[in-house]
Image (cartoon, rainbow, N blue to C red):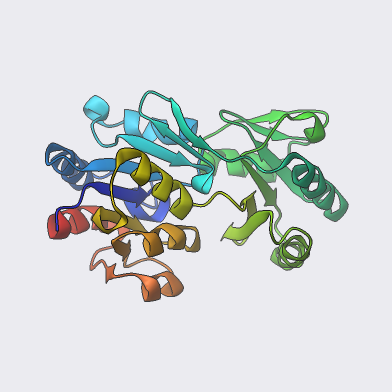
Amino acid sequence: MKYELLATDLDGTLLTSEDYRITEENQEALKYARSKGVKIVICTGRSIKSTKQFIEAVEGYEVTDYFVGFNGSVVTNLNGDTIFRKPIQKEVLMGLIDIGRNEDVDVHVYNDTEIKVERYNDRIKEYEIHSATTAVLVDDLKKEEFSLKLLYNCGDNERLIRMKKKIQEKYKDEVFVFFTMPDYLEVLSSHANKGLALEYLAKHLGIDAEKVIAIGDNENDSYMIRYAGVGVCMKNGRESVQEIADYVTEKTNNESGVAEVIRKFV
């Protein structure tokens, strides 16, 4: 099988865990895949703006063709042209903001380039460091025109679990709600996940699912791993994701596991 599109997650997959970089081995492997005509798409929960800094750290920027950001809410090409975008429905967004306020947790609302918050504290400062972004303080999140993603930031995991159940009951047909970390509960439109975004991009490029490789490590990657002709989970990935994958790497993200996949399948 000649594969034509390779999708890779960023954190826990393409990036190292400690210093958030693309290893030389992974860089060379991605460049090799592109030289063979394989299109590369980076699929991440981060914003496109945040993701680009990791690409710009690579000489020549020659490691990707497309970006999927906010866990599937937006797809762009390397020039920043939007191919696909699915924000949260406006009335649902208003309700989600109310839930966060009532539970007294930090609420993050995301547009194409910025994170908006109603208060600034150490938890949000820590998130800025982790996500390599800067939050913008606003007086009322409900004034925002749209949001590609909403995130609840709280050190009380039990509270977030309770909120997740409430959101699933109230908006079961309108949103996906999931944890990316114990402290971070994310909400997307039900029309947005990495699998749907990857499927849309593949169809846009005229590529069949069987000719797609998808690599990830966490539950938010499961949609694209199920969609792809070859779904790959990293050795360091969650057990539940390894169980649905067609292939589990022998190397972790810190050991250039993405390069292993490219050597095996490209």
Is 164 located above or below residue 192 in the figure?
Answer: below
Where residue 57 appears, as percent x and y from the top left, is: 31, 30
Is 196 located above or below residue 172 in the figure?
Answer: above
Where residue 104 appears, as percent x and y from the top left, is: 83, 51
Which residue is pictured at 61% across the width and 60% down the height? 178
Instruction: Please tell me in which quadrant of the rendered image residue 253 appears.
Output: bottom left
Where residue 257 appears, as percent x and y from the top left, is: 25, 58
Which residue is pictured at 39% across the width and 55% down the height? 12
Number of numbered callouts drawn: 0
Which residue is pictured at 68% across the width and 38% down the height? 109
Is 113 located above or below residue 167 in the figure?
Answer: above
Q: Is residue 183 visible?
A: no
Q: Is residue 185 left or right of residue 256?
A: right
Camera-side residue of 51 and 33: 33
Instruction: Please tell me in which quadrant of the rendered image residue 235 appears.
Output: bottom left
Camera-side residue of 119 and 169: 169
Q: Is residue 93 left or right of residue 188?
A: right
Q: Is residue 259 visible?
A: yes
Where the N terminus falls, by quadrant? bottom left
Instruction: Please tell me in which quadrant of the rendered image residue 119 appears.
Output: top right
Q: Is residue 149 left or right of residue 240?
A: right
Q: Is residue 84 left or right of residue 164?
A: left
Where residue 33 appears, as percent x and y from the top left, is: 16, 44
